Image (cartoon, coloured by chain):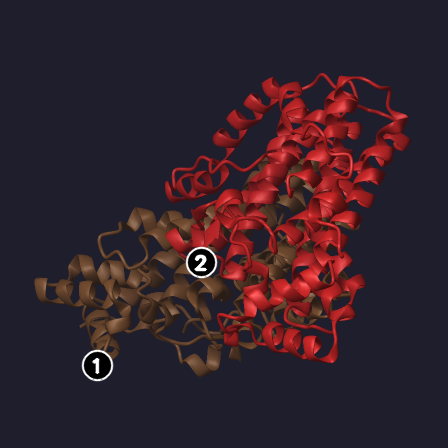
Chain colours: A red, B brown
């Protein structure tokens, strides 16, 4: 029999790891970041702050800006640029979400109706553009061309990854390599950049910048693997994302890729039918998909992989001295993974 | 009787002014710019260059990069940054067009089916994002934070203007001031930035940078006024834009604003009906709109205003020494206006 999800993913789970340690560590800087975000998303065109605040105020975890601030703390940084960059990465992320929801035709996010439902696709596209440009203005304020290069590179990679995701959507023949490429681009690139730039503004050596990049990169992959697993497991009402969204959109994520690879010919026919033409799915397809996924234990396997990336992320921190910042960043990895359980 | 369009707009028209003089002046740099554009829009994700080249190769006039290159010539600039910035402004413009066509649900541009028709809204949004990020990467390559600030400021203004345009769409009570705000933001800001940055990379004094900004700003307003006038006059097949597009979308541009202001109560009722609910327009509404617009001569008046802005643009060049570059930039203004006739 397959091990249960909890056994597979957290064999030593005792106390549930939280993001609280990191949140407390950077509480003051995060308050300053929130003020910066509110200030920078303002505009005489009232629709802009209205729409942006719907998403930004809607209780996102602010994981990316927390990482920037936590890494800045780890690097002993004392200046003002960390807050600017924390706001910047949250803006890039928010702009991406706005465009994603248009692209995916999503109707709910974090338990709320999406901006495209409330204000229309047009406003979501244009306010997303506005937030993108604001994020670049925030980078420029740091005065560091190296920081600009890193964050713009990440933004370009995100866009490229989103296009690739669109290209391989509904394609049951797409490879695990393609899938990894997509999540590296659309999620890990911004996590990596959000962490790396802290070392740059702190003037730390290249090895430390690389270590923070590795930390963010591997954490980002783990984070996305968990997100994709949760779409087949979690209670939609609790996490505010609709369970089964990926399935209904015909998005080919790791739980499905593995189920296709291990399934019988009958199962593969099922996957081709529901993924290639998701609009024709019937009511019984979703429970059938869950049964096939459980049969091959592909959620548990996705979580196992997430833990492997999580371990790499934590190891990357080893070159930094032990202390509260390193411990908080390390615990954030456990949180990112075990929030699924 | 109202004067004809040609009489109102070009009382001294003899030889038709062309963009050829500017095109010849910057021909070598434009060839380098085109190579840079092709190089920078490439990606392993083949959909990106396919979609981007559809729009970029589709015979746009490349007016913005020509302005950057022409102004750089006027400033005696000799380095490599002008070509990078010329490619950059074309990318910003192209990204904007891709998102515009999604927002406007357009089906034709420059005589071709739009990218959103051929590849879908999703691909258009995401490839637009990709080109935006590439444009920022091109700016960064110049190594000038001042250039970055100018172009990012313009990009933010464009996005803000597009949102404002969306907010006042279908609103016959919107003011001429709102309309001017929109065209300054969505068109003049990028024209101004495309010209100003040439003075910056050439290390010219602030007064010259400001003069080029004024030139681009006023030319941009004139250019957009003409575009908006042509939507009610030109032969769609010739200019590759559908005549009547703005009308069918309920977009409130100057020809309509003036017709509303001068119309009888019956006419104002007509405008409210067709603009506020454009989906309910009938076949006779478009010819009726043209009759009202002609009755009040609002196209001719739009062209008169365009000429006033055009004169300001030309005057802004006065602080530069006479010569081929100044003459070519001046003639580009006449072209921008008289292409309508």
What's the chain of the residue with tag 1?
B
Q: Residues within 10 Å of mark 1 (few under 14, many from 20)?
A: few
Residue A312 sits in quarter? top right
In space, the residues marked 2 and 1 are separated at their CA atoms by 30 Å
Q: Is residue A220 above or below residue B55?
A: above
Given residues A304 and B261, the one toward you in this image is: A304
Point out the frontmost of discs 2 and 1: 2
Label 2 secondary element: helix
Please rate how many residues cluster around mark 2, counting C-alpha atoms within 10 Å: few if below 14, some from 14 to 19, many from 20.
Answer: some
Q: Chain of mark 2?
A: A
Residue B327 percent location from the top left of the image: 59, 58
For numbered disc 1, what is the local secondary structure?
Answer: loop
Along the viewing direction, whichever of A73 and B163 lies nearer the viewer: A73
Query: Which residue lies most toward the front here?
Result: A1
Judge by depth and name the residue closer to the eye, B97 or A256: A256
Q: Tell me where residue A136 appears, x and y as whole percent.
A: 62, 40
Question: Residue A297, relative to residue B340: is it above or below?
Answer: above
Residue picked out by circle 1? B284
The N terminus of chain A lies in which quarter of the figure?
A: bottom right
The quarter in which the C terminus of chain A is drawn is top right
In which quarter of the view is residue A327 placed? top right
In the rendering, at what x and y percent does residue A311 appear? 83, 38
Residue at 62%, 29% (x, y): give it: A84
Q: Quadrant of residue B208?
A: top right
Residue B116 in view in this figure: yes
Q: At which x and y percent is residue B11?
A: 36, 68
Q: Is residue B78 in view from this perspective?
A: no
Farthest residue to the left: give it.
Answer: B265
Residue on which disc 2 sits: A121
What is the tally of numbered marks visible in this picture? 2
Judge whether A280 appears above or below A338 on screen.
below
């Amino acid at each position: 029999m397959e091990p249960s999800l909890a056994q597979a993913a957290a064999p030593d789970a005792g106390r549930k790891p939280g993001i609280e340690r990191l949140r407390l560590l950077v509480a003051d800087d995060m308050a300053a970041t929130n003020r910066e975000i509110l200030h920078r998303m303002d505009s005489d065109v009232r629709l802009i702050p209205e729409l942006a605040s719907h998403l930004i105020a809607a209780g996102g975890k602010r994981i990316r800006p927390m990482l920037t601030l936590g890494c800045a703390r780890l690097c002993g940084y004392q200046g003002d640029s960390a807050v600017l960059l924390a706001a910047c990465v949250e803006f890039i992320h928010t702009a991406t979400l706005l465009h994603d929801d248009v692209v995916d035709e999503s109707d709910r996010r974090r338990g709320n109706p999406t901006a495209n439902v409330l204000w229309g696709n047009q406003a979501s596209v244009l306010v997303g553009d506005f937030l993108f440009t604001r994020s670049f203005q925030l980078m420029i304020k740091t005065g560091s061309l190296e920081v600009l290069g890193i964050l713009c590179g990440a933004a370009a990679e995100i866009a490229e990854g989103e296009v690739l995701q669109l290209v391989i959507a509904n394609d049951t023949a797409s490879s695990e390599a393609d899938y990894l490429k997509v999540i590296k681009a659309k999620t890990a690139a911004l996590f990596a950049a959000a962490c790396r730039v802290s070392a740059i503004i702190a003037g730390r050596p290249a090895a430390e910048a690389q270590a923070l990049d590795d930390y963010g990169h591997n954490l980002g992959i783990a984070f996305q693997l968990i997100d994709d697993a949760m779409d087949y497991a979690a209670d939609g009402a609790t996490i505010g994302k609709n369970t089964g969204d990926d399935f209904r959109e015909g998005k080919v994520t790791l739980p499905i890729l593995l189920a296709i690879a291990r399934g019988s010919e009958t199962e593969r026919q099922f996957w081709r039918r529901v993924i290639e033409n998701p609009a024709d799915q019937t009511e019984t397809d979703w429970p059938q998909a869950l049964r096939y996924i459980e049969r091959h234990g592909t959620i548990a396997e996705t979580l196992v992989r997430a833990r492997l990336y999580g371990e790499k992320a934590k190891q990357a921190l080893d070159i930094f001295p032990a202390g509260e910042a390193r411990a908080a960043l390390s615990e954030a990895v456990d949180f990112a993974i075990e929030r699924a359980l």
